[in-house]
Image (cartoon, helix red, strand yellow):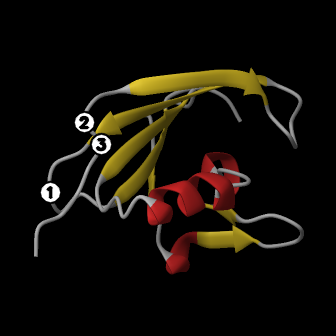
Amino acid sequence: MARLTISRSGSVQGIGLHTGAETTLSCHPAASGTGIVFRRIDLDGSPEVPARISEVDVTDRHTAIGHGERTIHTVEHIMAAVAAHRIDDVLFEIDGP
């Protein structure tokens, strides 16, 4: 079965709901088989967090994935959009907490 990604990159900027920090989220097409991956480009080494159930960290009124410094909060909204469009492979880069 064919896998889907997005056709081009795009980004949005705003204030983080839980942090109050200015943050930019960029979306990039990804190679088939990559899956849904979040990359924290504001951290040394730009750690990546795959969107997997094993990465779920916090679920108190929001969903967070990753652990420690590389945690990404409130992913349920973008994950719902990805699921609604049946996207299989995409890279999200985040430049803030």
Mark 2 → mark 1, Cα distance in angstroms? 13 Å
**What's the amino acid at mark 3?**
Ile
**What's the amino acid at mark 2?**
Ser
Q: Which of marks 2 and 1 is nearer the N terminus?
A: 2
Q: Where is residue 14 in the image (x, y as percent from the top left)?
A: 74, 23
Quadrant (top left/top right/bottom left/bottom right) for the C terminus: top right
Q: What residue is pinned by disc 2?
A: 7
Q: Which residue is drawn at 73% across and 54% down?
A: 74
- Residue furthest to the left in view is 1
Give the secondary structure at mark 3.
Answer: loop
From the viewer's perspective, is residue 87 above or below residue 70?
below
Give the secondary structure at mark 2.
Answer: loop
Along the horizontal axis of the image, is 7 left or right of 23?
A: left
Please give the label number shown on residue 10: none
Q: Residues within 10 Å of mark 3 (few under 14, many from 20)?
A: some
Task: Decide if residue 23 is in sight here.
Answer: no
Task: Decide if residue 87 is in sight here.
Answer: yes
* Rendered image quadrant of residue 86: bottom left
Q: Which residue is drawn at 72% across and 52% down?
A: 73
Q: What residue is pinned by disc 3?
A: 6
Give the secondary structure at mark 1.
Answer: loop
Mark 3 → mark 2, Cα distance in angstroms? 4 Å
Q: Earlier in the sequence, mark 3 or mark 1?
A: 3
Q: Are marks 3 and 2 in contact (CB under 8 Å)?
A: yes
Quadrant (top left/top right/bottom left/bottom right) for the N terminus: bottom left
Q: Residue at x 54, y 55 (%)?
A: 81
* Rendered image quadrant of residue 3: bottom left
Q: What residue is pinned by disc 1?
A: 32
